[in-house]
Image (spheres, rainbow, N blue to C red):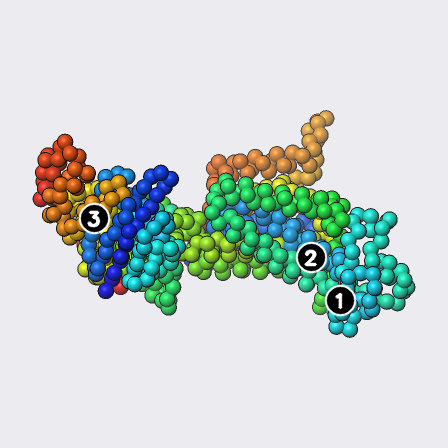
Amino acid sequence: MIELSAKDLNKRFGGLHVLKDVSFEVRGPELIGLIGPNGAGKTTLTNVLDGAIKPNSGTVYLNGRRIDQLPPFEVAKAGLGRTFQVTRSFRRMTVLENLFVPAQAKGGRKSAAEILEKAMGVLEFLTIDHLRNEYARALSGGQQKLLELGRLLMLDPDVIILDEPFAGVHPRLMEIIYGYIRRVNEDGTAVIIISHQMDSIFSLCRRLLVLNYGDLIADSPPEEVRKDAAVIEAYLGTDDADDDASGVEHKTSS
Amino acid sequence: MKKRHTPHLIGLVLIAFFAVFPVFYTGNDYSYIMHVFITAFFYAILASSWSMLAGYAGQFSFGHMAFMGLGAYTTGLFSHYLYLTPKPTNLCTEFAFGDGYLVIVDPVGVTSSTLAQDCLTKAMAIWGPGVEVTPMPIWIGIVLGTLMGGLFGLLIGLLVLRLRAAYLALFTLGFSEILRASISAEIKITRGQAGIELPHLFENGVTVFGHYFDKTDKIPPYYVMFGLLLACLAILAWLAKSKFGLFVRALREDEDAAAALGVNTTRYKVLVFVITSMMAAAAGAVQAHYIGIITPNNLIILQMSLVVAMAVIGGLESFVGAAIGAIAIEFILEMLRNSFQIGDLTIDMTIWRLVFFGVLLMLTLRFSRNGLITPLIDYFARAHVAQETVAKRKPSSAAEGVPK
């Protein structure tokens, strides 16, 4: 069973304490939302989990293997994949080449024909198979987001972290991304979504982690988070707490 | 024949042309034209290997001519200071080697042929005639030069791991200038600006298919340099098609994203430095033996700029484009050497040709950033893509399932 365990993670940048004793566990193919105001430490936490940043203290284990001191490529091979807040496709490489990078980096005994077959399946699933030989720079912003998701599929990770997957995406593509997340999760992959789009987060996720200036202030199902006084105060603001809380309810029900 | 195969066909025709040219060309300027070709092939190796480093991997190093110089000086020093003698000199540092002795000649600087004498010269004067002193085989020097280029490529590759863009360029520029200045300063060993003389590629001549070629004949070095160019292009083609090519292009595009997808960016960054440095060093070693002398001036930044400009004008993201660009530019620069007159005005093209070259570089950068050759290759090689994209477009449908 998939097991991601972060314990007492601390990260400081000079005088800024960005992560403060953050601990949480992911057991099995969960679908988790990671939310918090800007500057809460969400992306830093992602960078610590994927090895791009080393924590000052604390540990991260993935499936029993300690990964917090590994370089990002080792973490990726260990089974943790991530996307970036701003889409980072390999723009001067074709769509297919973008998909071949993680498949070949992962190693294994798959032949080029097998990788191509899988890549074509992924592209069809994401409805961008007709663009397979185009350079990634020719794709729209939304299509590049799909391409980034496709690259993750080629990596076959146990845990994926999606940083703002819905930002600036057309509703039609949003449906495809929803379908992607649900299907990947049903197929046994744990998914952590970072997003400011509350309606998407509340409708998709069965558990929410809430960060506030480095503190993990909530780790609960969405319905509990909605009513959590600390979350409302930190995330939505004390003065308008009642209004904003109802706003969340409204968005979720829509 | 499909349109996309046209570049391959043109490539084969070009290779065939270069392969038979020395046999069929009979002009009065034969030696000169052969020399231009050999120099063009030399620059083609440098430009194509630099395009792998800068165009494919995005590592804008300005140390490529330094690696070329390392190869040249390694084989130069090797052939200048090491000899095999049948008996001990008792004056030099020497080791028993097979039936004779491996002698390391003491460095005496630029005055060795006039005032001061090195230990081997003194020993030979004592021995008198009849004692045969054997220079080291040239091919060993070339191999050592190539390996030295790889070793320094590894070192520089490791040192610049965290440097990107302008910082990498400045670092490698610094390395290049330090090397050149050190060679200039260390007169006793390297003979400074006087340079080191090297034996010719075929010092004792060579016989091929029953035909004897003198050491100054241009045909043997032509085929050696052409062979080296083909070998380098073959290796580059293989690398570009393999996962190496895929990964270095990914790290050029976005190093962090490549690492997040499982690419060991450190390994491939260092590897691309090692491989391309070895190619530059090999070209430098062969060229030094062909010319017969290597001086620090071969490493100046102007030479590096020439290689960069050749690669940029040919096409930075295609090593084939860079190689063709280098050959074409070398020929154009040579053709532009001839001065001409407009009325009473004499246009000295030895100076103005560089202006022409600079203008061509600026126009290329402004209007065709991927060079003049690479877009042509792309035109044929990617002709099918647009049709394919349109033909395969279909209404997006809901996903059926994640492929495994």
Chain to which the residue tagged by mark 1 belongs: B
Residue A142 in which image quadrant: top left
Kind of residue at disc 3: Leu
Name the outermost residue toward the top.
Answer: B344
Q: How many numbered circles does the render carry?
A: 3
Kind of residue at badge 2: Thr
Residue A184 shown left or right of residue B218 in the figure = left
Whether residue A161 is visible here, answered yes or no, is no
| Residues indicated by labels 1 and 3 sit on the same polypeptide chain | no
Q: Report the mark closest to the observer, 3 or 2.
A: 3
Left or right? Give the position of A129 relative to B203: left
Chain letter of the residue beneath label 2 in the structure image: B
Q: Chain of mark 3?
A: A
Q: Which residue is mark 2?
A: B75
Question: Does the image show residue B183?
Answer: yes
* Residue at the (65%, 54%) spot, across then down: B71
What crowding class fits label 1: few (fewer than 14 Cα within 10 Å), some (14-19), or many (20 or more)?
A: few
